[in-house]
């Protein structure tokens, strides 16, 4: 069981607008949290870091029931379990919707299941994930299939995105899910924001920067934003997500570098620029090979772009 710091109070942000909520999350309050995450939740297979697990549980604990919690890209259900557990701490009922193909690549099944002592579900993880989340009962709904065919109605209080693997997916997420966010209240967590080879995740938030306030980031991967309001499925800014040039992508990275605080994040931004330069026109994760970049190359990019 993992335990954290001093007790928090959700009253700190009651009635606050986007700016106040962003300032609250900027303090990374999940790091000072008296809040136990049970071992059976932590044992659900997941790729996210320990800090991201805690952050998701904390964000879940802040929810007020004013909208749905949405998880895009569940893998084996770990992030959804953290979010659901956090929501269950303060409320008996909540409405979490989890979307995934539930058919992960074989190498993921081996690494996160077989090598950890679990049974290989042979490509279909829906039943497995359903078992991991069973304790939350009807509070959780699982949706199998690609998100590009998803429909959803009703307000969204928390949107956790781990499915931004291409510019087209980002466009769909922005048109289908984001207009349902609650102005001044909803939290959006972009899990791929700092991940090497996912520049469209950064560019999506850059294109929509007038509609969101940056709040905080974790040491690896995730960035948190508060929704300001005003988006519709026909908002012109969404059109820029799939029409952006490589130069637009680099400008988005430089925008992000202005508010990301940690030195490691600046290195991540240099990696993004390097991969954009090396893979012109790439707009899908398959076109951005995961590879090591020399410290000298990254240092030069950082110097050239003032990172």
Image (cartoon, rainbow, N blue to C red):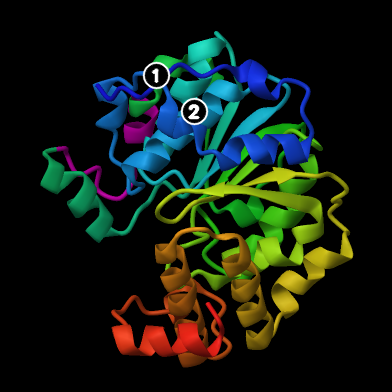
Answer whether residue 123 is magenta in the image: yes
The crowd level at tag 1 (other Cα within 10 Å; few <14, some 14-19, many 20+) is many
Q: Residue at x 58, y 12 (%)?
A: 93
Task: Report the front residue among 246 and 216.
Answer: 216
Q: Quadrant of residue 90?
A: top right
Magenta range is 118-131
SS label for mark 2 = helix
Q: Residue at x 29, y 33 (%)?
A: 44
Task: Report the front residue among 212 and 246.
Answer: 212
Rendered view: 287 above or below 229: below
Q: Where does label 2 land, which residue? A: 58
Q: Where does label 1 land, which residue? A: 35
Answer whether residue 287 is magenta in the image: no
Q: Quadrant of residue 281?
A: bottom right
The answer to whether residue 122 shows anywhere in this view is yes
The answer to whether residue 181 shows anywhere in this view is no
> Does label 2 or label 1 sit earlier along the sequence?
1
Q: Where residue 94 appears, x then y in whole percent? A: 59, 18
Q: Where residue 207 appears, x then y in whole percent? A: 75, 67
The crowd level at tag 2 (other Cα within 10 Å; few <14, some 14-19, many 20+) is many
Q: Where residue 241 appears, x then y in whole percent? A: 72, 70
- The reply, left or right, for residue 75 in relation to residue 205 is left
Q: Quadrant of residue 171?
A: bottom right
Q: Where residue 27 appears, x then y in whole percent? A: 54, 38
The answer to whether the residues at label 2 and label 1 have Cβ atoms under 8 Å apart is: yes
SS label for mark 1 = loop
- The reply, left or right, for residue 115 in relation to residue 70 is left
Q: Residue at x 77, y 73 (%)?
A: 240
Task: Report the front residue among 277 and 21.
Answer: 21
Distance CA(mark 2)–CA(mark 1): 8 Å
């Amino acid at each position: 069981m993992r335990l954290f710091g001093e007790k928090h109070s959700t009253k700190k942000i009651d009635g606050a607008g986007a700016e106040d909520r962003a300032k609250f999350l900027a303090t990374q309050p999940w790091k000072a949290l008296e809040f136990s995450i049970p071992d059976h939740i932590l044992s659900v297979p997941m790729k996210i870091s320990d800090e991201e697990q805690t952050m998701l549980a904390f964000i879940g604990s802040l929810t007020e029931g004013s909208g749905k919690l949405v998880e895009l890209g569940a893998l084996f259900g770990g992030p959804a379990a953290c979010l659901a557990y956090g929501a269950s701490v303060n409320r008996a009922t909540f409405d979490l919707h989890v979307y995934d193909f539930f058919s992960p690549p074989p190498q993921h099944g081996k690494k996160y299941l077989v090598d950890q002592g679990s049974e290989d579900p042979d490509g279909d993880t829906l039943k497995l994930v359903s078992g991991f989340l069973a304790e939350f009962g009807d509070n959780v709904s699982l949706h199998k299939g690609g998100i590009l065919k998803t429909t959803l109605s009703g307000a969204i209080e928390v949107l956790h995105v781990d499915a931004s693997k291409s510019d087209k997916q980002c466009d769909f997420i922005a048109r289908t899910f984001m207009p349902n966010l609650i102005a001044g209240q909803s939290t959006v967590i972009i899990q791929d924001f700092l991940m090497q080879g996912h520049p469209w995740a950064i560019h999506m938030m850059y294109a929509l920067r007038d509609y969101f306030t940056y709040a905080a980031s974790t040491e690896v991967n995730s960035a948190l934003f508060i929704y300001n309001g005003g988006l519709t499925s026909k908002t012109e800014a969404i059109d820029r997500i799939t029409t952006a040039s490589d130069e637009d992508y680099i400008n988005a990275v430089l925008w992000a570098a202005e508010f990301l605080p940690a030195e490691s994040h600046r290195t991540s931004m240099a990696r993004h620029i390097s991969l954009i330069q090396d893979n012109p026109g790439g707009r899908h994760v398959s076109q951005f090979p995961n590879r090591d970049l020399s410290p000298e190359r990254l240092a030069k990019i950082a110097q050239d772009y003032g990172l």
